[in-house]
Amino acid sequence: MELPGRSCGSRAEVLSRLLRLGYPVPDFRTVPFAAIRRIGRGARFDAPQLLSEFDPSDLIIVRSSPERPEWGGPKPIANIGMCSERVQLLAKIHGEEEAAAVHAEFVQTFAIDVFGLDAGFFDELACSGISQTERLQCSLEHFCKTTGERFPESPAEQLEQACRFMARSWEESSARLLRTAMGAPDDAGLGLIVQRMASGLLGPNDGSGRATAIDRLSGDRVLSGSYSFREPGGGVCSTGLSELAEISPGVCARIEVLLEQLRVEFEDDREVEFSLEGGNLWLIGTRPAPRSPRAAIRSAVELTDDGLIDESDALLGIAADTLAQIIHPQVDPDCSNTVLAKGIGASPGAVSGAIVFSSAAAEQCRAKGESCILVRVETGPEDIRGMHTANGVLTGRGGLTSHAAVMARGLGVPCVAGASDLLFDAIRQRLISNAGRVLREGDTITVDGARGVVLDGVADLIQPNLDSYFDRFLKWADKHRSMDVRANADTLDEVRVAAEFKADGIGLCRTEHMFFEEERLTVMQEMIFAESPGMRRQVLDELLPMQRNDFMALLTEMSDRPVCIRLFDPPLHEFLPRDRDEIANLAIALNLTEHDIASRADELKEFNPMLGMRGVRLGIVLPEIYEMQARAIFEATVEVGRRGIRAIPEIMIPLVSANREVELVKLTVEKVAASVRAEVGIEFEYRFGLMVETPRAALRAGDLAINSEFLSFGTNDLTQLTYGISRDDSNRFMNDYVERKVFPEDPFCSLDLEGVGELLVIAAGRGRQSNPSITLAICGEHGGDSKTIEFCRKAGFNYVSCSPYRVPIARLATAQSAIRARQGTGDKI
C-alpha cells in the first residue's frame, strides 16, 4: 500500500508510521487536503474506485485527519457498507433482533450526522420499547418521508455522502471559528482516512476499546481504559480492561507491551485505540495519552530519566499556562452540579462558599472561619478589603483585565467576571439565574475561575499537589532560562507566595494597597483633609511607622532578592467614602460635618481620574507623600541591614512623561536618603527608576534613562493610553472586535506586538543608547503571558514581573523562549 504524505493530515501520518514500524493496522486509504477541498466545492468523488481497493465484505469507517490534531474535525462515520446483505450475515451470528439493532443504529447516526435530521425522533424511537426490527423499519420510513428519497443502500453512495458531508463540515463558519481559536490558519487542511473496520461484529467477545498505561490525574503507571463488544442477543456491553482480561486472557498483557513499545518509538506516553477481531489485536490509532498537567509533568520527568528525551524536550512539551491547573484547586470533571451561569474565567482555581455582597460580610465570614464568595456587579478600590478576605470573587461585569480580574489574579483568588447570565439585584441582595433560581446571601455556590463557570452548591474539587516532579521540572526551567522572573506583590502574604514559587524578586509593589486597611484608611483620609503641607506631614508621620514596618517585612521575606517599590499612584478620591453611612462615620472620626466630607470629595472629583492628579503628579504637587514613603523605605533598609540582610530596595516612580518630572522627584528622594544617612550614620544603597506607562515616556526613554537605573514598563496603562481604550470598559465591545478581526486578540490579555510592542522596542533602544547599563523590565499584567515573555527576551529585557501565582508559569515560559532561541526556532522581532 502506498503511504500518504503530510498532505493527508496528522492522523494519516501516525497510521503510516505505525505501518512502517510493523504494527497491525487495518487496511486504509487516504483522501488528501486538495481533494477534500474540491469535494467540499461539489466536485465528483469516485467512491466506487476507492471501495474497489477493499474487500467487498469489509465495513468502512471514515475518520478526519486534520493538519494538526488540536484543530479538531468532523467525528468519524462508521459502518459504511451496512446493507441488507451485511445485516443477513450478522443475523446468522447475533440473531435478527441484534442485527436489526446494529442496522438501526447506523441509519440513525447516518441520518443525523450526514443528512442533518433531527435527533429527537430517533431518540424517542430508541426508548419506545418497540422491537429492533420495528425500530429499523420506522427509521427508514422517517428518513424517506423527511428527505424525499430512500436511505442509501449502496456502500459507494454511503461513502460518497459521508466524505462530502465531512468536507463541507470542515468549511462551515462555526468549525472555522473553533479551529481559528486554536491557532489554525484560514487555509488549514483536512484529510480523510477511509479504513477497513476491524469492528468485531462477527465474533463473540470481539469489539473495540482504548487503553493507556498512565493514570490521567496522577501520572501513576497503571493500565487503564475501556472496551465495548456485543453480546449475542444482549446488545452492546461496555467494560473496563480488567474485565477484558477475564474475557480474553492475555490481551491486556499484549496491550501493555504494545504501549511500552510505542512509548519508546514516539518518546511519549500514548493512548491506543484497538480492536479485537477473531482473537487478532488490531491497532486503529494512537495519540498522546490524555493527562492532567500534573500527570504530564511527571511523565516528562520520567521520560527524561529513562533517556528518551532531554530536559529541553521535557520543558518544551508542557504548555506553560497549564501549570495554573496544578497550582490552584480545580473542579472535578466528573461533578454533576448545576451550571448557574457562564462568564469569563478571570482568575484560575475553584472554590465553594457562601454568597456575600459586601466587604464587611466577607470579613465576618472570615472571622467565623467560613468560606465565602464576594459577589459584586463590578469591583472598585473600596472592595479591596473584601477581596483580601473572600475566598472567591464573582462579578456581573468586567473581563480579563477588569479591576476584579487583576486583583484576584494577584491574590490567587478564583474569579469569574462578566457573568451576565445572572441578574445582580443589589438592592434586594440576591442573584437570579436565567432558569429562575434565586440565590441570597448565605446560599452556597462554586466559582470555577479556570472555565468561567458558576455552579450551584458545593462542587467536588481536586486539590493542588506540588510534588517532587513539579519541583524538579521547574528547577530544569531555571537552568535554561535567560531572564529573571519577579512577582507583583503588595502584601506580606503575596510576597510569601512569590518566595514559595521561587520568584527572583519583587518587580512591582503597589504601596497604595497598603493604605486600604481599616486602621490606616482613616489616617489616609485625615491626610487628604489636611489644609497645609505642614498638617499633611503631621498626619503622614502617623503612617510612617506603618509603612516602615511594611517594607521591613517585605525586605526581610525576600532577603537578598530585589524589591521594587512603586511610590503612591492612584488619585486621592479613591480613598474617600461613597455612601451616606461611610460619609457619616468619617465625619465623626475627623470631627467634621458631612457637608465638609462631601465638599472635599467634590473638589477631588475629576472628569477622567486615570489621566488626572495621580502618579508622579501627586509626588510633585504634594511632595510630602513621597517624602514619607522614601523615608519609610530607607529606614526599613537600615533596620533589616542591622539584622544581617543586605537589602538594596528599588524606588519606582509611576506615570512619568517628562524628564523634569524625574529630576524633581529624584531630588526629593535624594534629600530624604541624605537625611536618613545623616541621622543613623549608616550607609545604604538603593536604585532609582521609572515606570514607563505613557507613549511619551516610551518615545523619550533616552532622556529618562539618563536619570534612571531601570525602566519598568507598565503595559496595563501603556496599552490603554496607546489605544485610547479603558480596559475596565473594553469588555463591552472587545469580543466583537476580535471576532471581526479588528484586533487579532484582546490587547489587554496578550501584548499588542505591533503597536505597544513597537513602543517598547523604541524605548529599549533609546534607553540603552543613553544608558548602556540600564535595566529593562515589564511589570504589567502581560508579564505572565507566554507571547509577551517571548517578545521581552527578543527585545533584550532583563526580567518580567507578574502576579505571584503566575511565577511558575513565567519561569517555564522564559525557559521555553530561551530554548527555542538556542535551537534557532525563535523568530526575530
Image (cartoon, grey):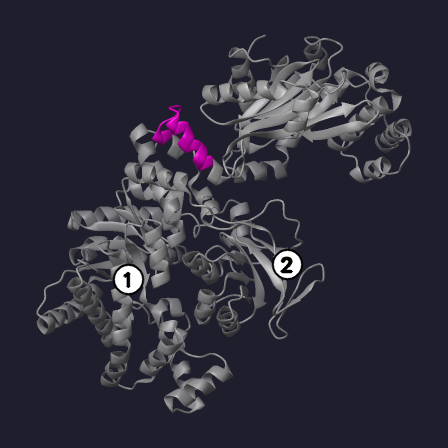
Q: Quadrant of the N terminus?
A: top right
Q: Residue 718 appears at what percent x and percent y? A: 35, 56
Q: Nearer the viewer, residue 427 or 722?
A: 427
How busy is the neighbourhood of tag 2: few (under 14 within 10 Å), some, or many (20 plus)? some
Position of 101 compared to 555: left or right?
right
SS for callout 2: loop
> Badge 1 is on which residue?
554
Residue 50 highlighted magenta (yes or no): no
Point out which mark residue 478 bears: none
- Decide: is 225 above or below 536: above
Q: Residue at x 26, y 66 (%)?
A: 551
Amino acid tagged 1? Leu
The reply to whether discs 1 and 2 touch (Cβ–Cβ < 8 Å) is no
Q: Residue at x 20, y 57 (%)?
A: 704
Amino acid tagged 2? Gly
CA gap between label 1 and label 2 equals 38 Å
- Report whether residue 829 is seen: no
Q: Nearer the viewer, residue 746 or 13?
A: 13
> Badge 2 is on which residue?
457
Q: Quadrant of the C terminus?
A: top left
Q: Residue 221 appears at what percent x and percent y? A: 51, 30
Position of 722 compared to 68: left or right?
left
Q: Most prominent secondary structure in the magenta stretch?
A: helix
